[in-house]
């Protein structure tokens, strides 16, 4: 599992005086960076053989400016050419958001999904989370 700490910024606060819902998806993408590095250690966009197929975010509680948010990230499932990344965000010791992202291993030359190699599968499996109940 990977952990990222984020300090909410003032401009991320909306008219309802909490962090805007659009911000969390961006935080979750930032939290996936260590997974992206498995596929492209250089983090050069042209070297990253992944595309995003789906994201979902559940807002569990309001997130407020001024208190650090901790995001825990791991792998929920590994398929043939895709995998599911699970995120959970905490503020003040309580869960405030959770979500998932489906990432597809992609061959840019053929513009199609590509099977995950055994080496990639093994590296992802190191971060496999227990199944949700």
Image (cartoon, helix red, strand yellow):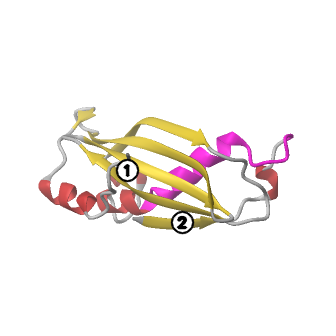
Residue occupying the far left of the picture: 118
Residue range highlighted in magenta: 15-33
Q: Which mark is residue 60?
A: none
Q: Answer few, some or many: residues within 10 Å of disc 1's Cα (few below 14, many 20 plus, some between 14 and 19).
A: few
Quadrant in the rendering for residue 21: top right
| Relative horizontal placement of residue 9, taking residue 84 as reference (left or right) | right
| Relative horizontal placement of residue 48, taking residue 115 as reference (left or right) | right
Magenta span includes 17: yes
Q: Which mark is residue 46?
A: 1
Task: Look at the numbered disc 1 and give the secondary structure of its residue.
Answer: helix
Q: Answer few, some or many: residues within 10 Å of disc 2's Cα (few below 14, many 20 plus, some between 14 and 19).
A: some
For image coordinates 24% across by 35% down, the residue present is 113
Q: Nearer the viewer, residue 41 or 100?
A: 100
Measured along the vertical axis of the image, is residue 131 above or below residue 106?
below
Q: Nearer the viewer, residue 120 or 128?
A: 128
The residues tagged by marks 1 and 2 sit, at their Cα atoms, a distance apart of 25 Å
Q: Earlier in the sequence, mark 1 or mark 2?
A: 2
Chief SS of the magenta region: helix
The N terminus, quarter of image: bottom left
Task: Look at the numbered disc 2 and give the secondary structure of its residue.
Answer: strand
Residue 117 x/y as whole percent: 15, 51
Q: Nearer the viewer, residue 126 or 93?
A: 93
For image coordinates 27% across by 58% down, the residue present is 124
Residue occupying the far front of the picture: 133
For the residues labelled 1 and 2, say whether their Cβ atoms are less than 8 Å apart: no
Residue 75 x/y as whole percent: 34, 53
Query: Which residue, given by chain and number where applicable, does mark 2 sit on?
Result: 4
| Closer mark to the observer between disc 1 and disc 2 | 2
Measured along the vertical axis of the image, is residue 56 above or below residue 78?
above
For image coordinates 45% across by 43% down, the residue present is 100
Residue 22 x/y as whole percent: 66, 40
Q: Nearer the viewer, residue 62 or 105?
A: 62
């Amino acid at each position: 599992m990977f952990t990222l700490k984020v300090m909410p910024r003032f401009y991320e606060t909306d008219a309802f005086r909490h962090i805007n819902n659009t911000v969390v998806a961006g935080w979750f993408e930032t939290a996936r960076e260590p997974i992206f590095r498995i596929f492209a250690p250089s983090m050069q966009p042209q070297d990253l053989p992944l595309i995003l197929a789906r994201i979902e975010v559940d807002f569990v509680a309001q997130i407020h400016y001024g208190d650090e948010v901790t995001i825990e990230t791991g792998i929920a499932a590994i398929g043939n050419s895709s995998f599911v990344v699970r995120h959970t965000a905490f503020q003040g010791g309580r869960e405030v958001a959770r979500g998932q992202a489906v990432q597809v291993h992609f061959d840019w030359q053929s513009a199609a999904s590509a099977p995950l190699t055994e080496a990639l599968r093994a590296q992802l499996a190191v971060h496999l989370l227990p199944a949700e109940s």
